[in-house]
Image: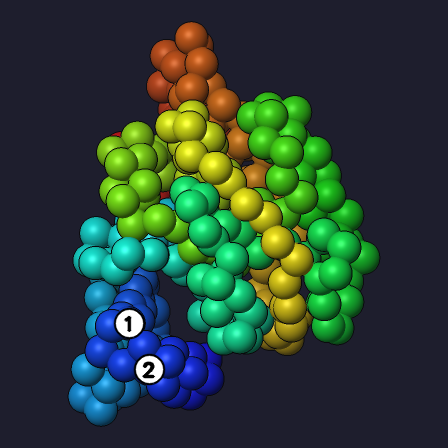
Amino acid sequence: MLDAYLPYFTGRYGGEVELIVVVNGSTDGTAVFVRDYAKRHSQLKVIEEAKLIGKGASLMKGFEEATGTFIGFADADGATPPAAFQDLVDRIGDAGVIIASRWLEGAVVSPQQPLKRRIASRLFNGLVRALFRLKISDTQCGAKLMSGKALKQIMPSLGLTRWAFDVDVLFQFRRAGFRIVEVPTEWHDVKGSKLKVVRASLEMFLAMVRLRLIYSPFRSVVTIYNMTMGRFMHYGEES
């Protein structure tokens, strides 16, 4: 991914772009690898967090360091080509956030994901629409770009959970009155995922229920939830 993203974006923006890699709980030498790249590319920064804090908390660390007019994130497996991420930059306009979608007409997804993952995705999306009234087709696609000012405004309101973080971000943008744009994207399914679909689906469901409770008059129920089912989930830090 660095071989693809670094020349593409530094070639376009020079010193006006920064790429931040947040390494969390890695045991495969990722941090050493990225630090070596950073020696040769001043636009690349690495943040290391040994304690396992999860996706949401890791992204928050990156957000806190980011200084750009626009701040975005993408999965580190390279599923989103750099040109597809640049498309978000070109189309964000005055929106608070623009997100890539694998489900809108015009999206190019190759190869097609396994059936069980597609079913899980649609069930999760239906749950998001029912609980949060977010009329978005793909909250979980790993490519999003946000207005830096808008992001800094909503960050104090974010409550971190492993699976619900993307939904939480979008929900906060909507609550704050920012426009959300969704566009079809190019996305390549990368082999080697260690995701266990059944377990992940259960965790997604519980995380969504928990997040909905946080933003409801029944917030106190979350305390009981954390003491029971919450002990088996991986939420990372909670604000």
Q: Looking at the image, can residue 34 be seen?
A: no
Residue depicted at x 64% and y 68%: 186
Vertical placement of residue 49 versus 120, above or below: below
Residue depicted at x 73% and y 72%: 110
Q: Is residue 83 left or right of residue 64?
A: right
Question: Measured from the top left, where is residue 83 in percent x and y?
Answer: 53, 75
Identify the residue position indicated by label 1 in the image. Answer: 17
Question: Measured from the top left, where is residue 10 in percent x and y?
Answer: 33, 82
Q: Earlier in the sequence, mark 2 or mark 1?
A: 2
Q: Is residue 229 left or right of residue 184?
A: left
Vertical placement of residue 18 versus 117, above or below: below
Where is the N terminus found, in terms of image quarters? Answer: bottom left
Identify the residue position indicated by label 2 in the image. Answer: 10
The amino acid type of the residue labelled 2 equals Thr
Q: Looking at the image, can residue 73 be seen?
A: yes
Question: Measured from the top left, where is residue 82 in percent x and y?
Answer: 49, 75
Front residue of 64 and 231: 64
Vertical placement of residue 208 versus 90, above or below: above
Q: Report the Cα–Cα distance between label 2 and label 1.
A: 7 Å
Q: Residue furthest top?
A: 217
CB atoms at circles 2 and 1 under 8 Å apart?
yes
Front residue of 107 and 57: 107
